[in-house]
Amino acid sequence: MRFMRLTALTLIILWTIPAIAQEEKRVMTVDDLFTFSRAGDPQLSPDGKYVLYTVSKADWEQNGTVTQIWRVGADGTGQVQMTQGKESCRSPKWSPCGKMFAFLTSRSDKTQIWLMRNDGGEAYQLSDHDPGISGFEWSEDGKTIYFLASDPKTEEDKAREEAKNEVIVVDKNLKNSHLWAFDLETKEEHRLTEGDFSIRSFVISPEGGRIAFTAAPTPKVDDNLKIEIYLLDLGDKAVEKLTDNKITEGGLRWRLDGNAITFVSDSSENLETYYQGSIFLLPLDGGEITDLLPGFEEEVYGHECMGQGKILFSANTGVNVHLFMLDAASGEVTQLTEGEKVISPGEVNKELGKIVATITDPLSPADIYIADIESLKFEKLTEMNPHISDIKLAQYRTIHWKASDGYDCEGILILPPDYEESKRYPTIAQLHGGPESSYKNAFSTNWGTYPHVLAGRGYVLFQPNYRASTGYGDAHMRSLIGRYFEDDINDIISGLDYLIDEGIADPDKLACHGWSAGGHLTNWLVTHYSDRFKAAGSGAGGANWSSFYAQTDMHYIREIWFTAPPYEKPELFRAKSPINYIRDASTPTIIFCGAADNRVPAPQSWEMYVGLQRYGVVSEFHLYPGEPHGLRKLAHQKDKVLSELAWFDKYILGIEPEEKEEK
């Protein structure tokens, strides 16, 4: 009997341990958002024994994120931080011999190339280029490093600075980027390209005698559609222009035989712009550019040319990102990975048949993985955030619903950790930016959406991949052309109705928020559906498309969306501007924007705020000094999260916020 009593007691204890462990877990807090390390950019050593990667962490002393380079063995052992200090180190690249690696850092004021031995020791500065370096690649023999750098200040520039003449002549004296070569033996550098163009990216040919590069007339973002592909002969330094079209070319790769270049462009097979990314082939014998994935529904991210005419590529499939293999000769496409996750390939080593990547899913922060290309059975090499085991995380579900016009929609539903089927919950529609983007099954501590924090506080989150999103085919993405705030809004409102009908969302406790294009949508919703939303958060949102056109650094994309500039279709621009319906707004709205935002400039947020104030709508405007389109300073990110949380709690739940903690 004694034995049986002890056994029963033991069973009770064993049954109780998981429950106690679960109870000991806590929900994610705002402070937790800034404790997670972000791993990325994995690079496999030439001998396959090590992987370099970057780790980004919050540094409150510097009020920003600092990135350093780490290394781990290809067997998952020996994880070690390689670079140290207050300055970020990025873009690690192994030397061809594998005994050292180069990286970029601004430790010496300007961004330069530094070297470090793999077996340890101090890193040392290699280049000393004025005004700094933006990107680089090793030559195949390891004797040369090719790099990109913008043109330095002229003597006239320096004289004007000396005279304290701070006048800016718009679009004048722009600094183009050009190619340079650094000789590791002589420690001398020499310029490779000249001309009225600015190089965006480059890639060295398999035999090492040529460099293919993309360039636009200027470094301006608005010149994206003027990007073309060029070829530099390293022997005679001759430059040949290979393309002449109106599409954006990028992600250049050489076919292994050196007779063709492949690239990614958001174009149709007829080379028309504003389509999902696809892979194109550019023969160097004068042949026509060919779309290698005509009719492919997913959005191509990146690719690598393999042997035997095969191309390995990653693609956005809507809520996931997976790997595919294309047989360029037959056009056959095979999906190689599956599951609810996001796979971001790093280096593909064709000689070793290995691939390294970062992989994340809704409950797992990104870590570094390695796999044989043949099997693609990924093995985890790092565990960057073990403290996640202490946190009760939200539940993710991929959901589908029909819009009011019968269109099939997809998105992500995020539920509180202790979600109960029998209850209705306050629900926040989170609207992604872009709009050429999509919500995915990835772990997020982003200050824009902070899903695990919101879900931990009892909110349900609705992330619709509305029409205009990517990953669902060209028709889905292009549906907003001439029809902004039509199909996209239909999908959002229909999705909320679906959640209400399913007994999930509380119709009396709805909110919406988003940044950039998500801010545009939020502004439209609060001026057209104010009776439905109790609170809203508009981040860097557009209010007036007519004034927006002249203020932004990307004019061409507005012309695509509205089929013309505002000077030709003023009524359409006016009809699609939320500010012109401001008298219909009543939703309490908090607004956020960076004062140095060139993409959706602060005057757009000012227009929205002044309009809401004029008509007595409860509103608040947080303007962040010096910030661009995305907030970079930790104090500003935290202010955005805390202020928005307090806003939602007050106007959705009726909870008066406590005094905000110090930033």
Image (cartoon, rainbow, N blue to C red):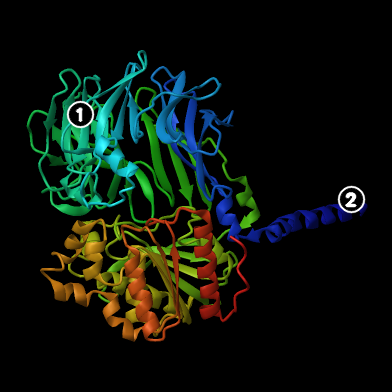
Quick one: SS at disc 2? helix
Residue 193's tag is 1
User: What mark, if any, has residue 3 been given in the picture?
Assistant: 2
Q: Amino acid at mark 1?
A: Thr
Rendered-image quadrant of the N terminus: bottom right
Q: Secondary structure at mark 1?
A: loop
| Residue 502 visible from this viewpoint | no
Looking at the picture, tell me which residue is in the foreground, 89 or 280.
Answer: 89
In this rendering, the answer to whether 440 lies above or below 195 is: below
- Image quarter where the C terminus lies is bottom right
Residue 336: mark in rendering? none
Q: Quadrant of residue 347?
A: top left
User: Disc 2 residue type?
Assistant: Phe
Q: Is residue 431 above or below residue 244?
A: below
What residue sits 38% from the left and 19% below the top? 96
Instruction: Name the one closer to the observer, 250 or 418.
Output: 250
Q: Position of residue 128 (x, y in %)?
A: 38, 27
> Where is residue 319, by image quadrant?
bottom left
Q: Is residue 614 left or right of residue 487?
A: right
Q: Quick one: label 1 or label 2, which is nearer the N terminus?
A: 2
